[in-house]
Image (spheres, rainbow, N blue to C red):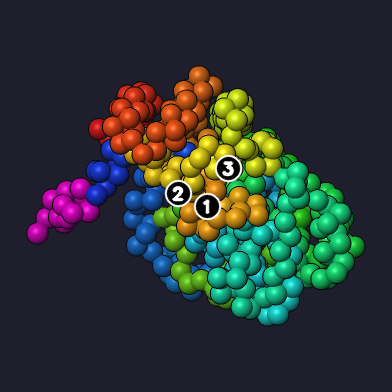
């Protein structure tokens, strides 16, 4: 058996990878939580660091042979601290959900109240949705956006006064506006609550100075590393010094075992990339491209939730055009454009066939698309949604989509 390459050893997995490379190269990726990592990040992920156990933290491990691992993890920590200007960083969380769970257990007791945003208004499952295990352990109370699509701070304050949460939680997965950390911190102080921002979606925009940074105001920040931050799949926690010990103990040994050091090396590389001046241009272009989406969908009469976008994403009610979110997602898939169906605030439709779609620009901006291509994508999307039952028309759109997509390579995806 030749185990030196996937191709010779495991053709099933090899073919699946090749087909996925082709899908990525030929398609337009608009899922706002996805991105394309650099070849350097891919290289670190596929390195021998995956062989090593290193429970503990740099300089304090439970295993021998960790001298190289310590270099890797220390670099990741120092770089992410520099990127966000924070006191303390833990780069071991395996992803965003484990990072959030580690924070809840690190600073709260079972039964404590957490005030977080409702999923259908742009929040996240791990912010207390009833289907999650965490909702059985902590008492989540959920706030909503108002009719104008804003987080009403008077409403938030009234809820905080009524429920006296131990933790106020901000940071969203489908919300397209910036967050007023300063005034939310003031509300938290009035009721003696701690503050946590889950910036998974917008971490890259914050790092580049394109969105408000919660670090100076909030106690704890969590994030994934694979969205706008453009690193490997993974998570991180940043916090103020007084929380550092509790957070580290909660991640390990409280919740996780051995850290995935190949992944942490890839995070370190992504943080280095995000510290480069070119990354600031990238973040600016993400927002500029999203504004084109806003402009073009507005012209076409679609209903944009929250009134538009200040970040990388848009949540669009497509029922105005006689189509459901699920129908739109399927039609767009057939046209080579990937996005996800999504609930809109107060959605009368069910989660598996909601009223909206969620689209974003981080991935295609990485591939170098700018304003003219964004306008063209909206034209294709509109045509696909209008012709959602017409497979021949969708196939025609797909061939145009593929022709354009192939002009903008995916890092590391070979022909
Ligand atoms: N699943 C991610 C997203 O798509 O936003 C959030 O965890």
| Residue bounds of the magenta highlight | 1-15
Give the residue at the far top of this rendering. Answer: 372
The residue identified by callout 1 is 354
Instruction: Read off the residue under disc 3.
Output: 317
| Residue found at x 39% / y 44% | 330
Marker count (numbered): 3
- Element on which disc 3 rests: strand
Determine contact: label 2, label 1, CB under 8 Å. yes
What residue is drawn where x is 24% and y is 49%? Answer: 16
Furthest-left residue in this view: 1
Asked which secondary structure carries label 1, the reply is: loop
Q: For marks 3 and 2, give the CA distance.
A: 12 Å
Using the image as rendered, state which of residue 246 and residue 154 is in the foreground: 154
Dot 1 or dot 3, earlier in sequence: 3
Where 283 falls versus 140 (above or below)? above
Question: Can see residue 75?
Answer: no
329 on left or right of 246? left
């Amino acid at each position: 058996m030749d185990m030196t390459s996937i191709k010779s050893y495991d053709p099933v997995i090899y073919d699946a990878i090749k087909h996925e490379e082709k899908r990525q190269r030929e398609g337009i990726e608009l899922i706002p939580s996805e991105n394309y990592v650099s070849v350097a990040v891919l290289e670190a992920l596929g390195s021998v660091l995956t062989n090593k156990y290193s429970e503990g933290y740099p300089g304090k491990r439970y295993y021998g042979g960790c001298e190289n691992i310590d270099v890797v993890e220390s670099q990741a920590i120092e770089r992410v601290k520099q990127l966000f200007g924070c006191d303390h960083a833990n780069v071991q969380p395996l992803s965003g959900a484990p990072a959030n769970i580690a924070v809840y257990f690190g600073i709260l007791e079972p039964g404590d109240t957490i005030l977080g945003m409702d999923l259908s208004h742009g929040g996240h499952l791990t912010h207390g949705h009833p289907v999650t295990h965490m909702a059985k352990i902590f008492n989540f109370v959920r706030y909503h956006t108002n009719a104008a699509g804003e987080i009403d701070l008077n409403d938030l304050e009234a809820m905080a006064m009524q429920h006296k949460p131990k933790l106020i939680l901000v940071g969203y997965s489908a919300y397209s506006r910036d967050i007023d950390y300063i005034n939310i911190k003031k509300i938290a102080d009035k009721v003696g609550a701690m503050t946590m921002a889950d910036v998974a979606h917008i971490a890259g925009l914050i790092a580049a100075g394109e969105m408000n940074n919660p670090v100076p105001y909030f106690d704890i920040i969590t994030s994934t590393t694979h969205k706008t931050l453009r690193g490997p799949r993974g998570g991180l926690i940043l916090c103020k010094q007084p929380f550092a010990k509790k957070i580290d103990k909660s991640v390990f040994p409280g919740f996780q075992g051995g850290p995935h050091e190949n992944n942490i090396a890839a995070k370190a590389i992504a943080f280095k990339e995000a510290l480069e001046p070119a990354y600031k241009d990238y973040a600016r272009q993400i927002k500029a491209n999203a504004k084109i989406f806003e402009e073009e969908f507005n012209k076409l009469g679609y209903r944009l939730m929250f009134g538009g976008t200040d970040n990388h994403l848009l949540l669009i009610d497509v029922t105005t055009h006689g189509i459901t979110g699920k129908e739109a997602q399927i039609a767009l898939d057939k046209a080579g454009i990937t996005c996800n169906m999504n609930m809109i605030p107060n959605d009368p439709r069910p989660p598996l066939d909601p009223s909206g779609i969620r689209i974003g620009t981080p991935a295609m901006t990485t591939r170098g698309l700018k304003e003219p291509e964004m306008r063209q994508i909206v034209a294709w999307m509109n045509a696909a949604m209008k012709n959602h039952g017409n497979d021949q028309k969708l196939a025609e759109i797909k061939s145009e989509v593929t022709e354009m997509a192939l002009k903008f390579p995916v890092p590391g995806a070979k022909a």
